[in-house]
Structures are given as C-alpha cells and as structure tokens.
Amino acid sequence: MASQLESPERRATASDSGGGDVTVTSGAAGATGPTSASAPLIQLCGVSRVYGRGGGAIHALVGVDLEIGPGEFVVVLGPSGSGKTTLLNVIGALDEATEGRVVVGGVDLTTGTRKELSRFRARTVSFIFQTFNLFPGLTALENVEFGAEVSGRHGLDAARILERVGLGERSNNFQHQLSGGEQQRVAIARALATGNPILLADEPTGELDFRTGIQILELLHEQTHELGTSVLVVTHNREISRIAHRVVELSSGRIVADGPPPGGLAEISDLHW
Ligand code: ADP
Ligand code: MG
C-alpha cells in the first residue's frame, strides 16, 4: 500500500509548480535559504529562546546548532523542562528564536514575512501532539481530508491514507468513537495527508499504553523509510530513543549528545517501559 503513495519529494517537484517551500530535492525555493542540493532540510545555528526578561528570564534553548536531512528519523530526548517542545515549535514556526538562525525547507524562519511563515506552516511541516488534537465535529476521514486542504495538495487520497494507518474501517467514526491509539493514528494520517516533508511529533505516545505506543512509533518509523519524510519525535522516555538512528539529547536547553543510541540500535519489539 505504501507504494501507492507518492513521496513528498517527488510530489513537490512534479506538482508544486508555484515553486513552494517543499524543496527537499532542489533546496531552492525560499530564496532566502541555502540553495545547494545537499543543504540540510532543517538547519539551526546558534539558536536561543528566552522567555521573559531580567532575573526571571527562562532560557529554554541555549546556543543550539542542529542539522537534519531529508528522511531522517530523529528522537529528541530530554527530561521535562529541557526545551524539547520549544525546539519543535521553533522548527515548526510556532515559536520564534530569540537569537540565531533557523532555516527549514529553504525558508529562513528568522527573517521570513508573515505570509512566508504561514505558507511554510501549511506546506512544509505537520505536527502530531500528545493529546491528538482532532476536530471532534469531523469524522476520521474528514479530519484526514482537512490535512490535504490545509497544505493545498488535494491530490492525496484521504481514504487510502486512513487505510495505510490501519483505520480504513473507521473512516466515518468521530473522535469519541475511537480509542486513544486510533485517534493518534488519525492524527498521523492527517499529517501524512498534507504531503509535507517534515513531521514533528511532541510526545506522541505520552497518553497511550505501552503496546499502543509501540504501534504508533512503528507507524512513524515507517514514514521515513517509505515516504522519505523527516520525522522528529520528542520524548522524555529514553527507551523510545533506542529505535532512532539518531538521538539528540537536550539538557537545560542545550544539546548534550547527538548520535546513534548509546546502547546500539534496537528493534521495536525489544522495547519495554
Ligand atoms: P519540555 O518540552 O522539554 O518539557 P519546554 O520546551 O516546554 O520543555 O520548556 C522549556 C522551559 O521553558 C521550561 O522551563 C518551561 O517552563 C519554559 N517555557 C516554555 N514555554 C514557555 C512560555 N511560553 N513562557 C514562559 N516559559 C516557558
Ligand atoms: Mg514538552
């Protein structure tokens, strides 16, 4: 079924005639960003985020340098309050860096206009949250269709994407008729329906039991392999980081480690928590 879905890269070059910001392969769109084909999809240089001023200021991110390429599956690991959500929000243009430069999908988020940023949010990044955040008044299928509408890519078949996450039979169900794991699957399907090249997931298994959490991770993991989507999963659960090829560890707003999981790469079936 996966092969029936076009990869975001191919779709971007084939149909995005507006020369938008989904330029995984060309890297040329934003004009403000890097233009070489090898430019990273996500690039942060000396990024800090400070909330408040003076003695009470909170330094959520401190001098963060980070580069992430297309198709990487990265786990961002750190205890509560270490800056994980702030990092994700800065990458997704939901929050602004106080200092430094953030270039994502060829768009410089630190100098972008409101219009550029709003187009970026629609066409480059998709978010998955701990609390699923579905529209309760829409069915599963309508929630997924919404993803394609937001990004303006109407070519993707929402019903097929819902099947892809194992919910083909539940397309007419509303949120309250779905389990937590099923709701999170719909949220993933909605994110995939955007066709956007970056998927940002903030503690996506935090509300789920172990077995369901594992299924959700498997699903996210597949996206990098089969669609070439770059996936960033934020978690405080070290066990989850064992399946990532790359673990970026945060402590008090600083990156303190960046590399393969210390104990070696584990199979999803080896995880326990
Ligand atoms: P994590 O996701 O790792 O738990 P966060 O990125 O949410 O960490 O928060 C990092 C730090 O920034 C924490 O000390 C938090 O209290 C603070 N913080 C986050 N958002 C805000 C905000 N909007 N205003 C003030 N402080 C904030
Ligand atoms: Mg958080």
Image (cartoon, rainbow, N blue to C red):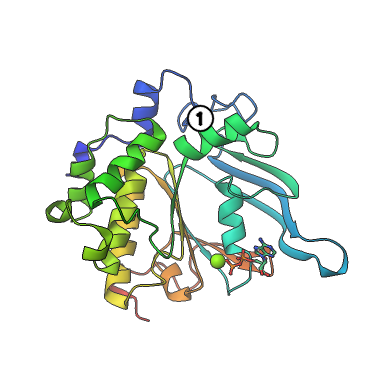
Where residue 168 appears, as percent x and y from the top left, is: 14, 51
> Is 160 left, or right, of 126 in this rendering?
left
Image quadrant of residue 176?
A: bottom left
Residue at image position (34%, 22%) is 14
Q: Is residue 152 visible?
A: yes
Q: Is residue 156 above or below residue 91?
A: above
Image quadrant of residue 129?
A: bottom left
In this orientation, which residue lies closer to the viewer: 258 or 98? 98
Where residue 8 appears, as percent x and y from the top left, is: 36, 35
In this orientation, which residue lies closer to the viewer: 196 or 138? 138
The image quadrant where one finds the N terminus is: top left
> Is 130 left, or right, of 138 in this rendering?
right
Residue at image position (70%, 49%) is 97
Q: Is residue 263 above or below residue 183?
A: below
Q: Residues within 10 Å of mark 1 (few under 14, many from 20)?
A: many
Which amino acid does the dot numbered 1 rest on?
Asp
> Is 232 left, or right, of 49 in this rendering?
left
Where residue 81 appears, as percent x and y from the top left, is: 63, 71
Q: Quadrant of ligand 2?
A: bottom right
In the picture of the structure, the residue carrying the numbered disc 1 is: 21
